Image (spheres, helix red, strand yellow):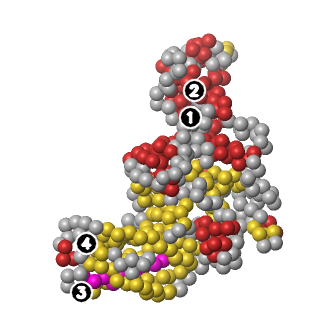
């Protein structure tokens, strides 16, 4: 600064406490520049107080990590080392790591130990072959950053655990099961090197999650084409499964998230929401609205729902498929004379245009469950709508096994909404009778 025409070193005019307070508002790049001004500032900008704040802001560090050689490290050297390894993620690391911290905490709190144990450790910086674009693949930084926190999932090759621990959520519907798991860096790199990624018609995609039991994938768009934008994540199903269910080729691509950060945020929110079904064995796609509950004569009915994008058809015969999971139970303190058996189901199905269809049938999925004190019975079924959304509600006719009285047990109305649908331009979408993506 200048006083009466003379240049004065401001750092020599202020107490160190004041200077440190002022420097606490300075970002790391400017701190490094200030350290080149004079020896006094150089000594101040290495203060642990300053770099501890920066380590927490950018790397979410609250303690200095232990070194392999047990040598003591300062907050300045810690920040420098982390920046050397992960500096390319300086703008997104805290966000990505923050979401992963929430996910880890929720998995542990909700007892989903199998999923928690499936999370791999971080990708070592020296093993990152894609940051320099050697493969001519420009992976969005948030996905690459996430792999440096958790390098995908380790999925068992057999046993029940293999069916339930995918972070994409598990769905079992009749003979169909799906549980997309987060791929590791090595698996993604192998897909790229083997040419198994879609790069036709100027649409480049990257598989981020994949079900090990069928061909369901959740992919990321690496460029922008049609309604696809770079970073969009969408469900991709191979034609064979769609032909099996619908008799037509799959031509629908449903948006899962607008970026990997968005997908990770959704996952963190779902796991912290008690309405999301999470068991010790895994994470399920079903979500239970707290208000979706009805009690009739001590029989409680709750419903959880999910959209099934990989089995939904959109272009030829628009059909959105939804699955619902119903639980019927009776409190253990209820008198045993309330024991009853389900006889018939009565549904009122309403699509997004207000069209009403009435469905009446015997039992549920071929069963006639008996509900008595302290027991519950759950089943999963599905429905389709020509519209983006719809709702169902109704009642179950049940007979009291002691009095033979017929009871109408209410099923609460449950609402279902599909994901947004993405399409390419018409010229890009079809190649004869085949989908080219």
Q: Answer whether labels 1 and 2 touch (C-beta < 8 Å).
A: yes
- Dividing the picture into quadrants, the one containing residue 295 is bottom left
Q: Residue 79: which numbered mark, if any?
A: 2
Give the prevailing secondary structure in the magenta stretch: strand
In the rendered structure, the answer to whether residue 410 lies left or right of residue 128 reads left
Region in magenta: 391-400
Q: CA distance from mark 4 to mark 2?
A: 61 Å
Disc 3 or disc 2, which is closer to the eye? 3
| Mark 3 crowdedness (10 Å alpha carbons): few <14, some 14-19, many ≥20 | few
Question: Label 1: which residue?
Answer: 58
Task: Count neighbours of disc 4 (C-alpha within 10 A) and say few if under 14, some if 14 to 19, many if 20 or more.
Answer: many
Task: Answer with mark 3 or mark 2, whichever residue precedes in sequence.
Answer: 2
Q: Is residue 265 visible?
A: no
Sequence-first disc among 3 and 4: 4
Q: Residue at x 20, y 70 (%)?
A: 334
Judging from the image, what secondary structure is the residue with disc 1 in?
Answer: helix
Q: Residue 36 in the image: state x and y as whole percent.
A: 66, 17
Point out residue 229 in the picture as x, y percentages from the top left corner: 71, 57
- At label 2, counting other C-alpha atoms closer than 10 Å, the crowd grade (few under 14, some 14-19, many 20 or more) is many
Residue annotated with mark 3: 405
Spatial CA span between label 1 and label 2: 9 Å
Q: Which mark is residue 372?
A: 4
């Amino acid at each position: 600064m200048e006083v009466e025409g003379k240049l004065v070193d401001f750092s020599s005019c202020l107490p160190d406490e004041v200077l440190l307070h002022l420097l606490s508002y300075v970002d790391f790049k400017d701190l490094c520049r200030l350290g080149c001004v004079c020896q006094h500032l150089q000594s101040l900008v290495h203060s642990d107080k300053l770099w501890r704040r920066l380590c927490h802001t950018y790397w979410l560090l609250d303690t200095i990590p232990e070194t392999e050689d047990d040598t003591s490290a300062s907050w300045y050297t810690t920040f420098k080392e982390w920046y050397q390894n992960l500096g390319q993620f300086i703008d997104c690391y805290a966000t990505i790591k923050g979401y992963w911290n929430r996910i880890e905490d929720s998995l542990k709190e909700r007892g989903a130990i199998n999923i928690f144990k499936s999370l791999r450790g971080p990708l070592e910086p020296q093993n990152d072959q894609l940051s320099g674009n050697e493969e001519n693949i420009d992976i969005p930084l948030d996905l690459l950053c996430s792999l440096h926190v958790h390098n995908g999932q380790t999925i068992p090759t057999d046993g029940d655990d293999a069916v339930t621990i995918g972070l994409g959520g598990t769905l079992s519907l009749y003979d169909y099961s799906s549980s997309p798991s987060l791929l590791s860096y090595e698996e993604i790199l192998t897909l790229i090197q083997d040419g198994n990624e879609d790069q036709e018609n100027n649409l480049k995609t990257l598989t981020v999650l994949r079900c090990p039991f069928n061909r369901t994938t959740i992919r990321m768009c690496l460029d922008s084409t049609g309604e696809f934008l770079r970073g969009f994540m969408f469900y991709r199903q191979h034609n064979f499964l769609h032909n099996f269910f619908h008799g037509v080729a799959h031509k629908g691509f449903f948006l899962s998230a607008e970026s990997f950060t968005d997908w990770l945020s959704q996952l963190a929110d779902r796991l912290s929401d008690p309405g999301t079904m999470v068991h010790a064995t895994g994470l399920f796609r079903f979500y239970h609205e707290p208000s979706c509950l009805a009690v009739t004569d001590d029989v409680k009915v709750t419903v959880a729902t999910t959209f099934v994008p990989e089995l939904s058809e959109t272009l030829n015969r628009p059909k959105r498929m939804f699955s619902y999971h119903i639980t019927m139970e009776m409190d253990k303190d209820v008198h045993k004379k309330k024991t009853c058996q389900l006889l018939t189901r009565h549904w009122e199905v309403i699509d997004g245009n207000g069209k009403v269809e009435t469905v009446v049938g015997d039992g549920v999925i071929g069963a006639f469950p008996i509900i008595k004190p302290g027991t519950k019975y759950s089943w999963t079924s599905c429905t389709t709508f020509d519209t983006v959304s719809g709702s169902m509600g109704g009642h179950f006719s049940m007979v009291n096994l002691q009095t033979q009285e017929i009871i109408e047990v209410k099923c609460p109305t449950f609402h279902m909404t599909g994901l947004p649908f993405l399409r390419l331009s018409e010229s890009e979408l079809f190649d004869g009778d085949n989908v080219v993506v």
